[in-house]
Amino acid sequence: MCEIHLIDNTAKVGNEMGRIYIRGKDGEKSIPIETVEGINVYGKPQLTTQCVEECLKRGIPISFFSSNGGYIGGFSAVNYINVKRQRLQAVFNQTDESFELAKKIIEAKVSNQIAILRRYNRTNNNAAQSNIDCMRRYRNHIGRCNDIHQLMGYEGISAREYFGGLGKIVRPEFYFSHRTKNPPQDHFNALLSFGYSLLYKELYGMVESKGLNPFFGFIHEDKEGHPALVSDLIEEWRTIIIDSMVMSLVNGNEISIDEDFEAADSEHPFYLTFSGRMKVIAKYNQKMETTTTYMDGYSSLSYRRAIDSQIRSLIYVIEDGNVDRYSPIKVR
């Protein structure tokens, strides 16, 4: 099974005799359609109407990104909608159980951020130790929060400490002081944004495939056009999948500022080149197929299967109200 990533703006994609064909500047290739899990379109590649229709019939999601990697939206089939489940989901954020689940996920997120900082702090003269200490104190308050606004307050100040610490332990040429987005203001933040878009899109597809509504969240506030549930669920995974992946790319000298980034204009100061995007996509797919032993109840699972399992656990909580059925992943 595979996902197709279309980055060549000259590419034309269609389907013939049970295969997806891709014609572009590097020639033509084709893939059996039954092996395709999704199609991701970056920039201006073109898909035929027949190809889109066949993908929808088969439940293959098609996702569209800007040329800078920002997720725009996509197509998915309607046969996965579960109305009964979505009615329960729509009122879940009004329950005590939803707040308890929110606390569990945010506490796990902060714990994972601390784990990532500790992993690199040891080999960087403990440069991020003060950030780690502050985050531990904030984490201790999460279980005692009384409402979602207080909870997200601790999440926010922990995130500031985390990214401040992360900037101290990256390669000097990738130094950054804080998280910036829309657009990212430095090379490291450009990598994070592109990686988060990949994970966000994949979570969106998984949520829809389980009959859930991506817009009915329980942590983030409702906003027009904002898939709040996807934003909720990504909190558990962004650090251990994307942040660790980006740190590996940067500190492992797998990506180059000179070769893999370009400066566009004042609105988009930094963005990944074709080669940079290909490196991140390859690393992302490798990471998603890496096995983890940190999932309760499993000896090992790939990260992709682990996320799928967590979404199923969320469904159990929504349908029977038992928060104990959801155990967020925590790394060490």
Image: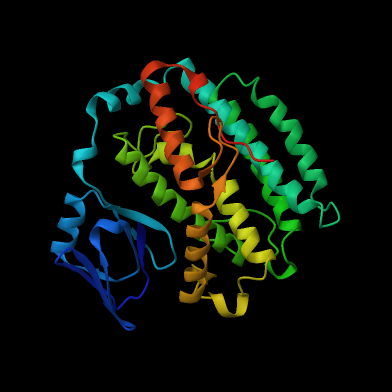
> Can residue 4 be seen by looking at this rendering?
yes
Q: Position of residue 141 (x, y in %)?
A: 69, 25
Observer-nearest of 24 and 142: 24
Is the residue 245 above or below the residue 161 in the image?
below
User: Quick check: 2 above or below 146?
Assistant: below
Looking at the rendering, which quadrant does residue 105 occupy? top right
> Which of the image's four quarters has the N terminus?
bottom left
Q: For the C terminus, which image quadrant?
A: top right
Coordinates of residue 227 in the picture (x, y in percent): 38, 41
Q: Residue at x 40, y 68 (%)?
A: 67
Q: Give the residue drawn at x 54%, y 70%.
A: 270
Q: Residue 274's x, y, as percent?
A: 46, 75
> Is 164 on the left-hand or right-hand side of 270?
right
Which residue is nearer to you in this view: 44 or 178? 44
Residue located at (37% from left, 71% from top):
7
Q: Residue at x 25, y 56 (%)?
A: 34
Question: Which residue reaches farthest front?
Answer: 299
- Name the outermost residue toward the right: 125
Q: Position of residue 303 (x, y in %)?
A: 50, 46
222 left or right, relative to 247: left
Residue 20 left/right relative to 115 = left
Whether residue 262 is visible, yes or no, is no
Q: How is the image coloured?
A: rainbow
Number of marks in picture: 0
